[in-house]
Image (spheres, rainbow, N blue to C red):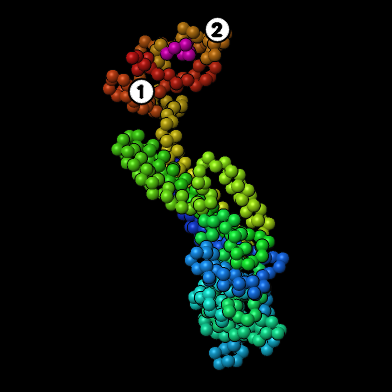
Amino acid sequence: MTALTKRGRWVRCLLWAIIYLGSAYALLGSFAQLSQCLAAVSLRYESSPLETGLARDSRVFAYQQGAAQPFWPTFWSEGSVVIQAFSESGSLAPMSGVGDEGLTLPILAYDGNPRLVKPLTLLSGDWPSAQDSSACLISEALAWQLWGSTAVIGQTLLLDTAADQPHQIYVVRAVYQDQTMGGLFSYAGQAYQPGWQVVELEGDAGAFPRSTTESWWQAAGLPEPDRVLNAPGLAAGLRLAASLPLLWTLLLLFIGLWRWGRRHPYLREACLAGSLIGLALLLPGYLDLLPGWLIPTRWSDFDFWSRLKTELNTRADEWLLLRPLGKDLMTKWQLLCLVGAGLMNLLAVSRLWTLLVVWPAVADSRLAVPDDKELQAAGQTELPVAPGSGPTRPGGPDAGCSKGGRKLPEAAAPAAPDDSNWRPPASLPGSVSVPLPDSPVMKLWISPVSDSQGIRQVMIPEQLRQP
């Protein structure tokens, strides 16, 4: 391998290492966003939104159950309202540009934990509590439109909820990163609440099958939803999928150390011991990622596998047929980013393995066979031929026979060379040192010759082939 080839290999290694680190960073970022999007079981009421009385009854049921119940509900829905922005002096915000008629704004109304409504990156402020009935979070674009700045924590918004309802006063608690105008407005404890399209069941929902979720909404007095999205179960599967690049990296690292340890027995033992310790540490964590309903109590329970298949098919159909609301588009986009970053990470670590382990091994195994120019540079005018080299040697006892045994015309066979004074060349390129059994290390010269059909042969001197 020439110096230029080595330099190019290291440049490619550096580029693939950068790609590997970048894809790993993107993989972790996408997974963090997905963890926020898939934090609760989502009940979708697309055809008929929940009434205020049903939502309150389910909240009372969850409160009465206390720690015995697995879920705590959060309600939210999409809508549009008319808002007016006021400055600290009580007048309309000077830079709002909306006038006395207000500004029509698409919002997300919620009652419960705002973190479950939409995953947001807050620029200023903090998440409000679930009991804060006057809290609102607005987008960066809306803050610039109304006040010309994002430092608007504590500013007041007047929300026109309905024609027959009084205006509701909201206080800006946080500004989140978004270039579209919108916001999240709390309806906790208010007399007027919109029809709720989504119920998010917060808790260890991924540890329970669909039957547990059905039992809960029936006991809470909620009607059967149009769709049920078991987001925590999907998140558990994504955690396993996101860890595949790490497992592949560790496997290639183990194989590389094992190959390198052929000359160092103690290194192999240390590598094997470290791998067993790492496996013992990682295995419990991976088992914890699996929900309990995915693991049978008895492996001989064949009905369990049929029920599991039916439930997985049902959940996949509900996910594919889901009408996107709020955070659903972000969830699907982050899912595509997660898959793309994972595949790029696998490709990068595989290419690094090829450049650092496979390519040097292949290059070292190749023996350089000198051509005619190299022989002339070494001072050889004729190709050296080993005496008694066998039937493939031109001019030997079987001259005129090809490698396959077909008889050639006698005129095609060259004259036999004089082997009486054959000596190994003193400085022939391509010589290597090899240990021979029961003998010291000797020089082995690789001498290229051509047979009668022009096939390149590698002849070894007879003196070195003697036992």
State the residue in front, 316 or 95: 316
- Residue 350 versus residue 171 in the image, above or below: above
Which x, y percent locates residue 361?
42, 35
Q: Residue 444 carries which label?
A: 1
How far apart are the two marked residues, 2 and 1, measured between alpha carbons?
33 Å
Residue 252 lies, in percent from the top left, at 44, 42
Which sits in the foreground, 333 or 313? 313
N-terminal of the pair, mark 2 or mark 1, is 2
Residue 68: image location, x then y, percent: 50, 64
* Horizontal and vertical percent position of residue 325: 65, 65
Dividing the picture into quarters, in which one does residue 377 lie?
A: top left
Which residue lies at the image location 55% right of the left edge and 63% below the top edge?
Answer: 40
Name above or below for residue 165 compared with residue 233.
below
Which residue is drawn at the image coordinates 71% and 68% (left, top)? 48
Quadrant showing the C terminus: top left
Residue shown at 28%/20% (left/top)? 439
Magenta: main secondary structure: loop
Label 2 element class: helix
Magenta extent = 389-395
Q: Does the magenta stretch include residue 406?
A: no
Mark 1 is surrounded, within 10 Å at the Cα level, by few (under 14), some (14 to 19) or many (20 or more) other residues, namely some
Q: Mark 2 points at which residue?
A: 410
422 vs 44, left or right, is left
Q: Is residue 193 left or right of residue 32?
A: right
Q: Residues within 10 Å of mark 2 (few under 14, many from 20)?
A: few
User: Mark 1: which amino acid?
Assistant: Leu
Secondary element type, mark 1: strand
Q: Which amino acid does label 2 sit on?
A: Glu
Query: Residue 88 occupies which quadrant of the picture?
Result: bottom right
